[in-house]
Structure formats: C-alpha cells, structure tokens
Amino acid sequence: MTLPFQTIPSLNGIRAVSVLIVMLAHAGYGEIIPGGFGVTVFFFLSGYLITSLLLNEYEHTGSIGIGNFYIRRFFRLFPPLFLTLAIAYLLVFINVLPGGITLYGVLSQIFYFANYYAIFVDFGGKIPDGTVILWSLAVEEHFYIFYPVVLLALTGFGLRRREIGYVFAFVCVAVLLWRIYLSHQPGFHPARTYFGTDTRIDSILYGALLALWSNPMDGLAERGRMSVRQWMLVAGALCLVAFTFVYRNENFRETFRYSLQGVALYPLFYYAVRFHDNVVFRPLNWTWIGRIGVWSYSIYLIHLIVIRLVATQWSAVSDKPLILFFFSFVVSVFYAVLIDRWVDPYFRRRHRSPASGGQGKDASSVPAQTPS
C-alpha cells in the first residue's frame, strides 16, 4: 500500500449509486432497473475494501488484529441493525406492517443466518415485511468472520499477494462450478444460488482479487492519464455488464451471471478509483453523493420497510413507483442522519479503525452492505 490508512476515492460514490439503484428497483422499477446488480457491486466493494485495509495493517504492523477487527465490525454493524429490527417488529406487533414474529425468524436476523433461513425455512412470511434483504448482511458477516483468519494464515505460510490471489481465484472458479451443479439438481430454486454464502462468496472475492493483484491505490499519485486502450477496456466491461442484464436465460442468471459481473467490475473499480478526477468518474466524488454513500448502510436497512409500510397504509400509491421511491428516500436519509448523529457516536468513538482515512465515518472504511 502507498500510505497507511489512505482514503480510497470513489468508493462512497459507488456505494451511493448502488443503493439508489436498489431503492428504485424495490420501489417498483425492477423490470427496467437491475436492482439485483447492487448485490454484486456491494459484495465486490466489500471484498476490495476489507482486503485493502487488512493488507495495509499487515504490511505496517506485521500482523492482523483479528479481535479488534471483529469488535469494529460489531460496533459498526449491530447497533443500527438492532434498532431497525426493533422498529420493524414493533410495526408488525401493532399491525401496521405485514409479516410475522417467530423465534427462529428473530434469531436468524440477529445472528446472521437470515440467508439460509430464507432458503430452507421461510422466505419472508414469518419475518417483518421488508427485512428479507438482511440475507445479504449474513453473507457479509460470514465473510468478516472467516476472511481475516484465512488471510492471516495464508500470509503466515509465506504466500505473497499474487499467490494469495491465485488461491482466491481458484475458489471463485469452484463456486461457479458449485452453482452449476446446484442449478441442475431436481427441485432447484433460484433462491438457493442467490442467497447462499457458499454460492455468492465469489462476488466478494473478486473484489479481494483487485486489492491483491492490481490495487488502484498503489502509486496513485503517479497514475497519469487514461489511454485509449484503457477506455476500450472500460467500454468492454460495461458491455459485459449490459450483457448480463439483457440475456435472460434462467440457468445463466443463476450461474455465470455473477461470475461475469465480478470480472467486469474488476476494471471498472480500478479505473474509477485510480482516475477518480477524470470527468467520467468525478461525480462519484461529489460531496452530496459521498454523504449518501456514508449513510448507505442505514439507508439500506430501513428503505424497504418504508416502501412496504407506505404501500400497505396508503394503497393508492402502492403501484406508483416514483412516489414510493420519494417517500423511501426522504425517510431513509432522515433515519440514516439520526443514526449517524445520535447512535453511531456512542458505539464507534472508541472502536473506530484509524483506516478511515482521517474522515471519521467515511464510507470508504466501513462495510459495503448489500440490498437484495
């Protein structure tokens, strides 16, 4: 890494754009806006960010503080999650939000196995409406639990960055083959490959590969200007992403789609970070876009609950996506600001990583949570 705990450009903006896309899709524009792509983007971002921070720590201290890492994740993730769940279950209890309240449903969301609960037990009916998206937090949390240990072990065996990347690339291929196998089993349901940690972890590892093999932060000050060849690579990556949207084959969507999107995001992230002041990528670093990125975790937690609540209590707008999006955006941002001002400071002040790049709660140093 070039400098210890350096702020990573464009990540806040990428997160903001992704969460806005997901909100639009959940509000009713899902047929024309690929909200599911937000899952892959957030997973990729998380893999890149966490790998960069852990490698930075290892290269400057000779170790990875796994205990401190877990503590930081807990105090970053759990307080907003607990508050949001309390609100959701209260709304169900007073019969203003559809859904159910069961012991296993609550436990699955608190202890981060909501993804497998949705796959094998119940998809949404026995939990508050709008909280099914917590499956993605479960995938992230499983990554957070095991990844620092795995990364420390691989570095302890003397493997260098590129060699560690080969290990993760092998895992990505293995996960793709596993998805293909599952998709050909009798009674297969797309939720199995969409929600499972074992079938989506490669989306996170593609981001880790970027940090390991060609981290755009390395030598950032000497980046120069983008060449024609580099612009062609960006265009090719965008075309590949577009292909994954328009090719509607169901088997492809549950197998190769995630892999191709991970491959395409590799150069897109690289150039968005490395050439962040280019006119194309500059909007990702606008202040107001960055603030949405900082608040994106809390926005993500509450936005679908708001949409479901408004659609239930105000049936006249249940089929009006623009109104649903507007209400969800306003309420979710307000909620996120309250958490940022009144909840986070109590839990994060003493447990904040210095990897935040000197910008406090900058979203380029916090987990990239994923909507559905």
Image: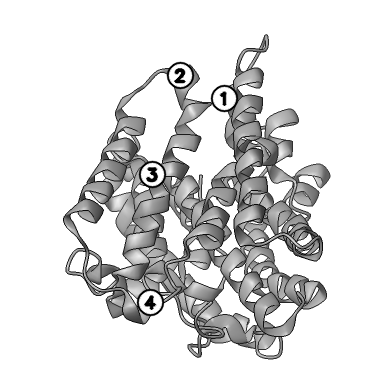
Q: Nearer the viewer, mark 4 or mark 2?
A: 4
Residue at mark 3: 264
The residue under the point 23% across, 46% down is: 235
How is colour applied across the structure in the image? one colour
Question: How far apart are the two marked residues, 2 and 3, measured between alpha carbons?
Answer: 20 Å
Residue at mark 2: 250
Query: On the picture, is 242 further left or further right than 111?
Result: left
Q: Residues within 10 Å of mark 1 (few under 14, many from 20)?
A: some
Give whichever of 256, 327 is nearer the camera: 256
Ranked by sequence position, the earlier of labels 4 and 2 is 4
Ranked by sequence position, the earlier of labels 1 and 4 is 1
Q: Residues within 10 Å of mark 2 (few under 14, many from 20)?
A: few
Ranked by sequence position, the earlier of labels 2 and 3 is 2
The residue under the point 46% across, 57% down is: 303
Q: Is residue 369 visible?
A: no
Question: How far apart are the two marked residues, 4 and 3, measured between alpha carbons?
Answer: 21 Å
The kind of residue tagged 2 is Glu
Whether 193 is drawn above or below 229: the answer is above
The residue under the point 30% across, 76% down is: 288
Res 163 quadrant in image: bottom right
The kind of residue tagged 4 is Leu
Residue at mark 4: 220
Q: Is residue 324 visible?
A: yes
Res 69 quadrant in image: bottom right
* SS at mark 4 in the image: helix
Question: Is disc 2 in contact with disc 1, using a CB cutoff of under 8 Å?
Answer: yes
Q: Nearer the viewer, mark 4 or mark 3?
A: 4
The kind of residue tagged 3 is Ala
The residue under the point 21% across, 70% down is: 225
The percent coordinates of residue 331 (x first, y second) are: 41, 66
Give whichever of 199, 344 is nearer the camera: 199
